[in-house]
Amino acid sequence: MKPSSSTSEHSARSLWGPLFTDPDVEAEICDRAWLRAMLDFERALTIVQARAGLVSEEAARMVVTAIDVGHYDPVAVGEGALTSGTPVVPLVRAIAARVTQEGRAALHNGATSQDVLDTALSLVAHRALGPILAGLRGVGAECERLAERHRDTLISGRTLGQHALPTTFGLKCAGWMVAVDEAEGALLRVRAHRLAVQFGGAAGTLAAVADPGARLTDDLAAELGLAAPLLPWHTNRTRVAELAGALGEAAGVLGKIAQDVVLLAQTEVAEVAEADGGTSSAMPHKHNPVRAVLVTACARRVPGLVSTVLSAMVQEHERAAGAWHGEWQTVTELLRLVGGAVRGTRELLSKLRVDTARMRRNLELTGGLLMAENVAVRLTALVGRAEAQDLVAEVCRTAVNSGCTLREALLADLRIGLTEKEIDDALDPAGYVGSAGEFVDRALAAHRGRGRP
């Protein structure tokens, strides 16, 4: 059962949906998507058991037909879940009501509610990661474009919020790109190898279907397109934790990009801007970095959800009393927020305005002081490293106290054994970006050489 378009449209038109949601991701995590995933498990279980001779083919066809043509309302299923604690019991009853006694014997055979919900969680995550990964590749492509275009665009490097040394905007964008690629790789690994089927029965032994037993898990995994675990993982939640961790990593990467944009877009800096930034309700002059703000909001909410998943790892014996119940909505919200952050970051970067002239002007805000290290390096050959650093530090203090530029202070100090041209060369930001260009080239080559699914 594919989620109806009305479900996705409703989510997109909700109060918060347009701000924090990607409609393509929402379609894979909404209530109907969860319901579809649970139904997919029951269908696949019936099919593989029929192949193994555990249930009759006629009974299996009856169950599959009831699943495929039946309409199951998430609201009704949810209301029916109050007595059992999971939506599986009322859903199985609703399917059973559509088949004969023979069909009921083939339905949910040997499974427990957690088998259905854990597999559904894997399916929902697997499907939602499709648009999330596609979006991350789009973010990486935007970073690639910016890194290549601005490979040699000078900008002030900032440490602890202050001007440090010159760097390039291309290197900053290449750093974003590498982090995005790494986050994408982590999610790809989880999707391919860690989202697994769950089938262990009441206590993880598959006692009800002991023959062929464990082989059914492999068949079920193949039918659903999920990984096959070594054994049931009812209270081993490393798979869910890895999913949450990888989503948290992606959110952190996207949040860092957004925060950089917010800082670079400040009025006093004004080195970048969103092409269609938002206005204020009270201040018409403002050009707010709206997308960056919304991505930041998504990223801020994710760590708490990751923490909830990690706290749910401590579970009792063979079945947890509440911990795995706490994962369903938590993982759903993680997927929703990361999907929204991916969408927002891609839109943000695709429409980012870069003011290269402002970047160059801002390099001069400290009157050449950010080039002090290069001056000390040039003097080291003449007076030694320690002496050069002490001398340049003293000249910098003189420049600050007198309100002159570093160039003026250096030319006025007779102890500086550099010619005027040597001083000018030492104060040129373009000559002190080290391996920035090479790093950008390396990052671009690695990005372009990555295999794509």
Image: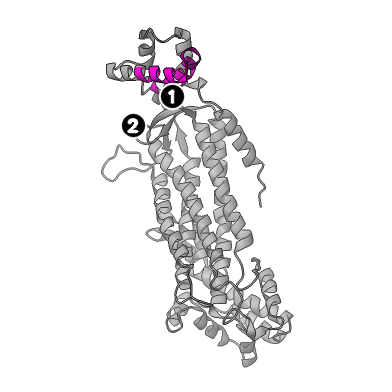
User: Which residue was labeled with disc 2?
Assistant: 268
Residue ID at (61%, 78%): 200
Give the amino acid type for the residue marked by disc 1 in the picture: Arg
Structural crowding at the residue carrying mark 1, measured as other residues with C-alpha within 10 Å and reported as few (<14), some (14–19) or many (≥20): some
* Cβ–Cβ under 8 Å for marks 2 and 1: no
Q: Give yes or no for residue 447 being in the magenta stretch.
A: no
Viewer-proximal residue among 404 and 337: 404
Q: Amino acid at mark 2?
A: Glu
* Magenta highlight range: 369-394
Q: Is residue 388 magenta?
A: yes
Name the one closer to the observer, 267 or 58: 267
Residue for point 43% across, 56% down: 303
Tell me where residue 188 sits by quadrant. Answer: bottom right
Left/right placement of residue 453 relative to residue 140 reads right
Relative to 331, residue 112 above or below? below
| In the image, residue 374 above or below residue 207 | above
- Specify whether residue 232 is in view: yes
- Count up the numbered dots: 2
**x and y, in percent, of residue 58 in the image:** 70, 86
Circle nearer the N terminus (2, 1): 2
